[in-house]
Amino acid sequence: MHQLSFFPSRTMALYVGRLFLVRSFGILFALVLVLQTLDLLGESGKILAVAGNGDAEVWRYIGLRLPQIIETFLPFSVLLGTILTLATLNQNSEVIAMKSAGMSAHQVLAPLFLAAFLVAAISFAFNERIVARATASLNAWQKVQYAEIPRETGVRSNIWVRAGDDLINAQTVQTGDPVRLTGVRVYERTGGVLSSILYADSARAVEGGWEFTGASRFIRRSGTVQPLGTIVAARGVRPDQFTLAQVKGDELPFFQLRSAIADLEAAGRPVDALKGVMWHKISGPLSAILMPLLGAVAAFGLARSGKLFIRAILGMALGFAYFVADNFALAMGDLGAYSPFLAAWGPFILFALIGEMILIRTEE
């Protein structure tokens, strides 16, 4: 058997890959069934408490919530499917037979990597086509407590815009022609230090800037307030910088989110947290490829030594440690403590190195 061949045996690759996929999707089905039932027990009362809601709304909730549960627990299912598959092969001495035939540890795991890559591709497509839309619809429905969703009014609230060193806050933004703002505050800064605050009751977009009415300026150094009346300020600030919708990364597919991030970045909005979410839309599904590597500890070692159960627990611990690290990194990315790339890819790279190190030590 050729040591450099990634799949030394086509029959063995199909056998192991099919075993892995059947177990992974079987575990996923069982998890989704239980978790959807428990989730529905908690939410059905809220749904049916709204006048006019009935069985149709309950089924609508299931249709919107089910994709989220599948997205969340698919990597867990792949991890458990990996451990169950490898532990079974080990217990039946099939791994020993493969090793005796000259297969390396990487060659034993190769069918699992290929099958996991297929799962990752399916997961990415599923998230893009179904999960993002379902999440947006469910979030909008939950905001109104499962009542009928009102039509879009064109009014947005508490919008922040950066203009050079200055920060502009509007309590409300009314889209239209022209765009109108109310409750406006312009935090005027010099070298990053606040020098004055420009207040205005309202503002509207005009040629070359914004017409502020009922304006006054608070001078920080002197502590005085200067009445200004109606003035034109915030020159160069475009109306679309205020009318851009507040973007939620989990509600948009990858390419739409990337376009929205570009628009927000051009408008001076902070986008690092969204960039982390965007890159995690790729690293998240790819985590399925890590699971055979992290669960490989259950495949090697003599089953009769009595340590197979301990090896399976160790594989589960490595997998769950990855999920904890992944969620922690995303949280740090939201806080700005981690860069977007590190938040999305740091745990993936770290645990890929850990898994590879354990596999190499197993080979030795």
Image (cartoon, helix red, strand yellow):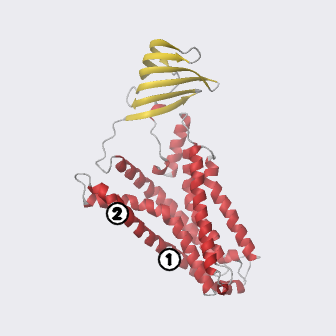
Asked if labels 2 and 1 touch by Cβ distance under 8 angstroms, the answer is no
Q: Is residue 321 visible?
A: yes
Give the mark, 1 or 2, whose residue is nearer the N terminus: 1
Give, as a three-letter code, the residue at label 1: Val
Label 1 element class:
helix
- Residue at the spot x=41%, y=69% of the render? 34
Q: Is residue 13 visible?
A: no
Return the x and y of residue 57 as percentages of the image width and height: 29, 57
The quarter of the rendered structure image containing the C terminus is: bottom right
Residue in the image at 53% along x and 67% along y? 76
Q: Position of residue 28 (x, y in %)?
A: 47, 70
In percent of width and height, residue 139 lies at 39, 50
Residue lying at the far left in this picture: please name it.
52
Residue at left 63%, top 80%? 308
Q: Which residue is mark 1?
A: 22
Q: Quadrant of the N terminus?
A: bottom right
Position of residue 332 relative to residue 72, above or below, is above
| Foreground residue among 47 and 26 | 47
Instruction: For marks 1 and 2, give the one nearer the viewer.
Output: 2
The picture places residue 312, in percent across and down from the top left corner, at: 60, 75
Q: Measure how far apart labels 1 and 2 are at the Cα level.
A: 29 Å
Q: Residue 41: which numbered mark, if any? A: 2
Residue 14 location, quadrant: bottom right
Q: Which of the pair 238/195 is nearer the observer?
A: 195
How packed is label 1: few (under 14 Cα within 10 Å), some, or many (20 or more)?
few
Q: Quadrant of residue 229?
A: top left
- Which residue is drawn at the image coordinates 48% and 56% (left, top)? 128
